[in-house]
Image: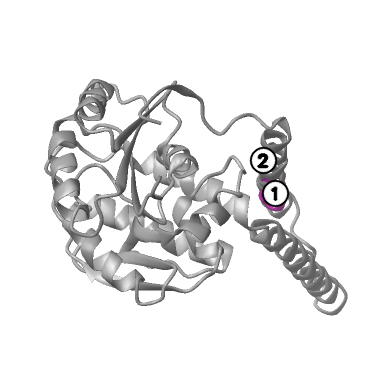
Amino acid sequence: MESVKISVVSPIYGCKECLFELYDRLVKTVSPISDNFEIIFVNDACPQGSWERIVMLCARDERVKGINLSRNFGQHYAITAGLDHAKGEWVVVMDCDLQDRPEEISKLYNKVVEGYDIVFARRTERKDGWFKRFGSYAFNRILEYFTDTKHDNSIANFGIYARKVVETINRYREHSRDFLLFAQMVGFKKTEIDIDHAARAYGKSSYSLKKLIHLAIDSIISHSNKPLRLSIQLGFLIAFASLLYAGWLVIRYFFYHTPAEGWTSLMVSMFFMFGLLFAIIGITGLYIGKIFDEVKRRPLYIIQETINL
């Protein structure tokens, strides 16, 4: 049996209306590259009933593979499920809302065959609302600072990845999932190309500000110990400042006969230190919680049903 040339992995949530159009456009785009392709739709417990449409597409075309997760695990877990089952020599990861235009896959493939292992799609003009753009910008800047890595705000999951890249990413089995961060961490020969980004025609983004903050904290704690190092540096800085202040109080007392202030300065410094200590304990607790999650070794996702796999 001839090996699969291209796999397209798309997590499905909240975009029931666009699935048929997504399928048609994918077939028209990928078929000129190779007839031997597969489209893997991973239903992340979409409440709209997307699975029924995926079943219809799988019945129409056996190249369409369906994975139905038992509950909502999240976008990056759904991508992981798709990557675990993808067989293609090249794997395309894209969202289902058609903001990642299927027609751009041709550009990605033409670039990757020049000798690259990863080609990221760079959105030259994002067609998102200001809130999502601002949230994405803030997320990437915070992630850059705490993980000491570079993150382009115009690059998301959309891209094409060589088989060896996918196999390497699949070896990352920690529970804190961030596909793009993994793709940047594994190395290999990578580049970016400009693509057209479409406006969202169906549904709305599931990433609220709360979810973005949670994802940022999760990614930072999982991939960097910089918050712990910063808390140590802050502790030494405060200790050094307190020594300087104590020396100044001694000088004022003996040379200027000025008594040290009592109740107000004492209470303010106590509340400040207690607040700081609780914050540091909380950061440490997050790291311990991550260790607890990992040692349980629970599955990253649970599959309820598959079709054509």
Give the residue type at disc 2: Lys
Residue, disc 2: 290
Magenta residues (range): 269-276
Front one among 213 and 159: 159
Mark 1 vs mark 2: in front: 2
Do labels 1 and 2 touch, CB within 8 Å?
A: no
Horizontal arrangement in the rendering, residue 23 relative to residue 214 (left or right): left
**Residue 253 placement (x, y as % from top left):** 84, 71
**Residue 254 placement (x, y as % from top left):** 88, 75
Q: Is residue 26 above or below residue 297?
A: below
Looking at the magenta stretch, what is its main secondary structure? helix
| Image point (36%, 60%), residue name | 160
**Residue 43 placement (x, y as % from top left):** 34, 30
> Can residue 122 be found in the magenta stretch?
no
| Image point (15%, 36%), residue name | 18
Front one among 252 and 90: 90
Mark 2: secondary structure: helix
Horizontal arrangement in the rendering, residue 226 relative to residue 188 (left or right): right
Residue, disc 1: 280
Give the residue type at disc 1: Ile
